[in-house]
Amino acid sequence: MITIKDVAKRAGVSASTVSRALSGKVPVDRETRDRVMEAVRALNYRPNVLAKGLKEGRTNTIGLIIPNICNPIFPAVARGVEDVARENGFTVVLCNTDEDMDMERSYVEKLQNRWVDGLIFATAREESEHILKLKQQAFPVVLVARHMGAAVDAVVVDNYSSSVEAVDYLIKTGHKKICIVVGDRDLMLYRERFEGYRHALESAGLPLYHAMVLDVSGRDDNGYDAIKSMLERGIIPDAIFATSDPRAIGAIRAIKDCGLRVPDDISVIGFDDLDISLYIDPPLTTVSQPLYEMGREAARKLINLINGDKDEKPQITIMETRLVKRKSVKQRL
């Protein structure tokens, strides 16, 4: 392996001169620099970036910890993180946890041991003490898509208000019996979306039918089985508010498999605005999250923290959503 001493010997200078010439931070006369660069090219020398990073106290590497890259919201988030990281000279290490807290803690330990400069978590739960511990240690941490109250810097959307808007739209278009397909309510974002649904019904004087509150997770995370079972029992809502687009797509399939039509018999509204939502039949009305921009903003926040730009208190950035109206909701008025 070619070392800095080999370059110095070929260029006829000291190793410290080579280091100064390569860093560009200390002036080196042009002739000497040219000799050093010629030696670098001739020997195909590659500086040890890790060693340099350790010496400077950083490696320009960040970790992105997500629940599952197969969940279609996370590729867009990850791309946003990666694009900003690359623009700022950082490399991203991606880890999937499958919502396994022990696996997540193991990843955190391994990444810290490998000198990552900071971590972005899309996995935060209220019981994620290891994230709070990192924050207490002044280790740069940012949350994306999920948050832990005001304890840690985060980039999120207003899940509560967005859900109120979605259900209000169903109500204003004449729907009175509205089902919700909701994910794991141990996660704050799904509790917030459920509370938005509940508030919208209550404000309109409409009942919340407990048989139409479908909690789904695990194997039936898209809600297909739960919705099909409900319909087969003769419980037929006017509309379904799905707390993610995959659940909305599962709802549309279940409705059709039961011999009913969307939106003529049952309207469906989702939450995400994934690319596929425009192309399913019918095109899905949904709450659009700026997933790519959320990833970019999370990376910007983290790099600012790494560079020492810290506010006195963690900052929660709330990105705007918008209701995208397509053809899966019927005007019943």
Image (cartoon, rainbow, N blue to C red):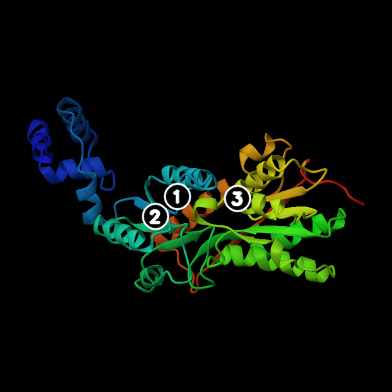
Of the two numbered discs 3 and 1 in the rendering, the one whose residue sits closer to the viewer:
3
Q: Nearer the viewer, residue 184 or 211?
A: 211
Looking at marks 3 and 2 on the same chain, the residue that comes earlier in the sequence is marked by 2
Q: Nearer the viewer, residue 56 or 130?
A: 130
Q: Residue at x 47, y 46 (%)?
A: 78
Which of the 4 image quadrants contains residue 134? Answer: bottom left
Q: Nearer the viewer, residue 197 or 107?
A: 197
Q: Is residue 87 above or below residue 127?
A: above
**Image quadrant for the N terminus?**
top left
State the residue position of label 3.
225
Q: Is residue 230 left or right of residue 58?
A: right
Q: Is residue 298 left or right of residue 210?
A: left
Amino acid residing under circle 2:
Thr
C-alpha gap between disc 3 and disc 1: 22 Å
State the residue position of label 2.
97
Dot 1 falls on a residue whose secondary structure is: loop
10 Å crowding of disc 1: few (<14), some (14-19), many (20+): some
Q: Is residue 177 above or below residue 207?
A: above
Say which mark, if any, is on residue 68: 1
Q: Nearer the viewer, residue 150 or 212?
A: 212
Instruction: Say if mark 3 contacts mark 2, CB within 8 Å.
Output: no
Amino acid residing under circle 1:
Asn
Instruction: Say if mark 3 contacts mark 1, CB within 8 Å.
Output: no
Which of the 4 image quadrants contains residue 106? Answer: bottom left
Q: Residue furthest right?
A: 333
Amino acid residing under circle 3:
Asp
Q: Residue at x 28, y 60 (%)?
A: 112
Residue 20: horizontal and vertical position, in percent?
A: 21, 45
The mark total stands at 3
Say which mark, if any, is on residue 159: none
Q: Residue at x 20, y 43 (%)?
A: 48
Looking at marks 3 and 1 on the same chain, the residue that comes earlier in the sequence is marked by 1
